[in-house]
Amino acid sequence: MKLDGTFTFGGPQESVWALLQDPAVLARSLPGVEKLDASGPDQYRGVMKVSVGPVTAAKFDVAVALTDKVEPSHFVMQVDAKGAVGHTKGTAVIDLAPVESGTEMRYSSTVQVGGTIAAVGQRMLESVGRTMMKQALESLDRELKARLANGRSAT
Amino acid sequence: MKVAVTVNGVAYERDIEARLLLSDFLRGDLGLTGTHVGCEHGVCGACTILFDGEPARSCIMFAVQADGHQIQTVEGLASPDGALSPLQQAFHEKHALQCGFCTPGMLTTLTAFLKNVPAPTELQIREALSANLCRCTGYQHIVEAVIVASRTPLP
Amino acid sequence: MPAEHRYLSARVTRNEDARLLTGRARFVDDVQVPGMLHAAFVRSDYAHARIVSIDTSAARARAGVVAVYAAADLGEYLTPAPLLVPPPPIPDVVFHARTHLPLARDKVRYVGEPLAIVIAESRYIAEDAVRDVLVDLDPLDPVVDLEAAMADGAPRVHEDLESNAAAKVVQTKGNYEAARQQADLIVRRRFLYDRGASAAIENRAIVAQWDTGAEELTIWDTTQAPIPIRNGMAARLGLLESQVRVVAPFVGGGFGPKIMMFYPEELVIPWVAIRLGRAVKWTEDRRENFYATTQERGQVHEAEMALTREGRILGVRDHFLFDTGAYDPYGLTIPINTQCTLLGPYDIANYDSRFTAVFTNKPIVTPVRGAGRQHGVFVSERLLDLAAKELGIDRVEIRRRNLLGPDRFPHNHGIMFQDSAPLVYDSGNYLPTLERAVEMIGYEQLRGEQARMRAEGRHVGVGVVCYVEGTGIGPYEGARVTVEPSGVVRVATGVGTQGQGHYTVFAQIVAEVLGVDVTNVKVVTGDTREFQWGTGTFASRGAAVAGSACHAAALSVRGKILKLASQLLSVPEDGLELKDARVEVNGSPERGLTLAELAGRANPLRGAVRPGSEPGLESTAYFGPDRGSTASGVHAVMVEVDPETAMVDIKRYVVVHDCGTMINPLLVEGQIHGGVAHGIGNAFYEQLVYDDQGQLLNASLMDYLLPTATDVPPIETDHRETPSPFNPVGLKGVGEAGCIPSGAAFAQAVEDAIGNPAFEILQIPMSPDLLFDLMTEARRG
């Protein structure tokens, strides 16, 4: 499954970059994440619960790695999720660039799904993926604006 | 949870798990193995029973949903003295069954159908059958049996 | 056979119906044993992976869980399943046997491969506990596509082999290269033919019970072959064959995969039952069925046909890849069927057929109704159609010019068939069958009207295709016929039944010979306690082989009846007649004895008997044909295609077939109808969709589409009979006939409907998407 798109954050590029590197922020913003802790430099481990079609509240052990970092404009995120009802492996290439209203993020991701979710959830995968991505990005944008309003810029 | 249900005219009371499927309740707890399970996701129709006279798929219902209701299964279609119903007799004469696994669901579905549409056309019959899968007969003899049964005067 | 046939070719209604119609027929999942436990399997989510660890501790700790076993727990019992079908002795055949383990060890090779089994007080608890088992798999790159699997450097499914080639087979006759030089036309194409799941409405199930006191194992199994299961399991478990009873009660459809042996579940469940001393039941659910039950899949053919300008076939060359899946316990049955069935009813003197069977990281492939014949028929029928177009010859006419004439039998093709005997067509008469189908579908009439209809915007087309199929193969079956003292005749045989009407058809054969009423013949089958020798129901052989054994046993009992009656009545045997369950004297019917009386007299409790005589009126007979018999037929289909949406409406479907002598035409029709429905599914709806990681994306009946009552038209049938010389009744098989040429028939019909020579259908299934794209391309081109 491929998931590509753009999203405009309402804030400066450095702030967006800082936000995306913070596991606590990601844990709060990504839908379904129950916890996400740093397990090494640019590496995180955690637990997620996701529903795809008839497969509800499926629990996954998640490992995230950030690589190919070119601060503050480019990085690659690898996600490896394993659970009883299936597994997912995804790679997302993230690019940030300044635009008039803030920062434009371009994302290009491929996701491979296996197990029960793949077998019975096929038709829902793309729409669930898009919904989760939208929820995550909007949540991150809210977080960004809250930080800026509190006077924090690059923490 | 307690469930009180009448099946083929006999009253039953049992204490069961909430998640027990109606199909498993009929087959396992009540020993009425005539109702068959083919897919457990409501597509093949082999599990069809009559729920207060209307066809329903017992594999996607919980047994507790039947509390206080009347159920008729394939075991209840013949007369008490063992005489086959006109539909069952027509199935026999027209060779409308081969392995017989889908047959209980066919019979319950069609029994209700013939009550509602006593003189159906071939097209109406095929549409009424279109949600019951058969892998053996190619449906032709089943359609012929329904036509014969619809023309049989009721006793 | 007596002159007037009461039961041969008789439309008799079935003996077995009453129980099936009233919900009183026992299927395996209906079996309940006191104290029975329930099993669920942990299965691989990856198509190709190393097994790092399997942690069952959490599962074992769950309330209601009795045991959890993985490969390591099976000890010495963990040995590979047997090679069920060794390759026939074809010269220079290359074959690598790689069979599966009861539970995977070291590596998994397809999504769904079983890793562990959970035994619990209920299936619900067992499924909960499946999720408790922590499996650590280290994914490897899988091979899914056939050509990618054969590319250099492709990941190897079996690492001890040099490549993913499971087998290489070459069969040739004549000299194709030389024939090719003489050709006026060579038609060459690449064909893709896909199949699918057998999708019987009943999924598989097993119940095993070990009686500790009697030291007897009973296995109820949805198998098409109870006797080989009994023999194999007894050997594996270190038991006498007589200590194991396998019962295949009513089985809800087989279609092939229920004769794959031995499934991992068949190997493990009885072992668990013995170990725990409690009965264990496993019922497959539908999603599991898509991985755990075998299926048929695709072949890729590069084929060409060399012809004269009059359309005479000089030769065919066909090189193909066959997807065997992760293991190959069923050998080469399917692709050899493809090789043989491609020749069809035609006089083809030169043939070069080669295939490579390819291991892939997908479920095991074994025969599904048709067993590879579909692929062969598609290739030859399409090549003929394309040749006809290029030569400007009518496509029915080109077939007429190539049919083997009735004087050419028996016809030895010189290549080997799946039963290890040379491919010999025993009898047939193809031209009248073709003409009858052409007449029934109104072929000439449609050709006259087609232009006018197209002008009105209606795209109607007809497809007429021919096939020959090998049926009724050995090795053998047996039957025992007994006249009981009540006068009821009991017939015991080994072939399980999955809806083919064995309780009726075998009764008809015996009733005919013994002069009794068919409802007074009780058939007992599918139970190894009742009959111990035989192979099973497959390859359209039940009637021809087991039926012939019933016939032979009945004739022998008839002999005993006449001999005893002759002694008792003091009338020579040729002065006696069997009629209405009695033996009566010709011309003086009031003088006679009932079969019941004779049965009693044949088994005295006191007194002396003649030395050398046998008690009772009972005989056992075996029948093993010299080779299989060849059935044949022609399918003709009329379709209308919507030129904008590419939806195909099937207007008429005609089948004219020859299955030799028919025992029960009513049941034969049923077999054909069912086969045609399956063929429609194969042509348009059914496809197992795997992604490039070997994940099956449509593992449910919502997404794997089976034809419904509104998708199958009324089917018109007619019969021809060229009896087989290989069995006394002249029987040939018909179980698979309905679905073999469907893909070819619809492809021809849809092409005819569209009428654009640039529009070619070279693959099956034909989804509306595919047809739409082809139509769009053709309009551009």
Image (cartoon, rainbow, N blue to C red):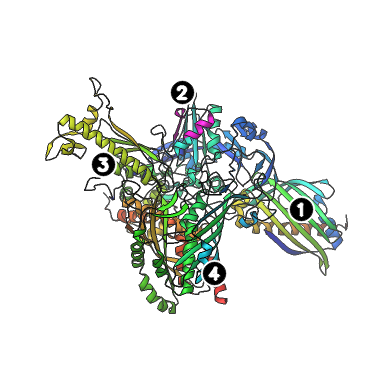
Task: Give the amino acid type for the residue marked by disc 1 in the picture.
Answer: Gln
Q: Residue C75: say if magenta.
A: no
The span from disc 4 to disc 1 (Cα, nearest Å) is 38 Å
Label 1, residues with CA under 10 Å away: few <14, some 14-19, many ≥20: some
Task: Give the amino acid type for the residue marked by disc 3 in the picture.
Answer: Val
Q: Which residue is at the front of the view, C17 or C658? A: C658
Residue B120 visible in the snapshot: no
Does C388 sit above or below residue B148?
A: below
Instruction: Name the quadrant of the C terminus of chain C.
Output: bottom right
- Label 4 chain ID: C
The span from disc 3 to disc 1 (Cα, nearest Å) is 75 Å
Closest to the camera, between mark 1 and mark 2, is 2
For label 1, the SS is strand
Label number found at residue A78: 1
Q: Which residue is at the front of the view, A144 or C724? A: C724
Closest to the camera, between mark 3 and mark 1, is 3
The residues colored magenta run C230-246
Label number found at residue B52: none
Q: Mark 2 points at which residue?
A: C214
Q: Mark 4 points at which residue?
A: C772
Label number found at residue C513: 3
The reply to whether the C-beta atoms of the residues labelled 3 and 1 are less than 8 Å apart is no
The reply to whether the C-beta atoms of the residues labelled 2 and 3 are less than 8 Å apart is no
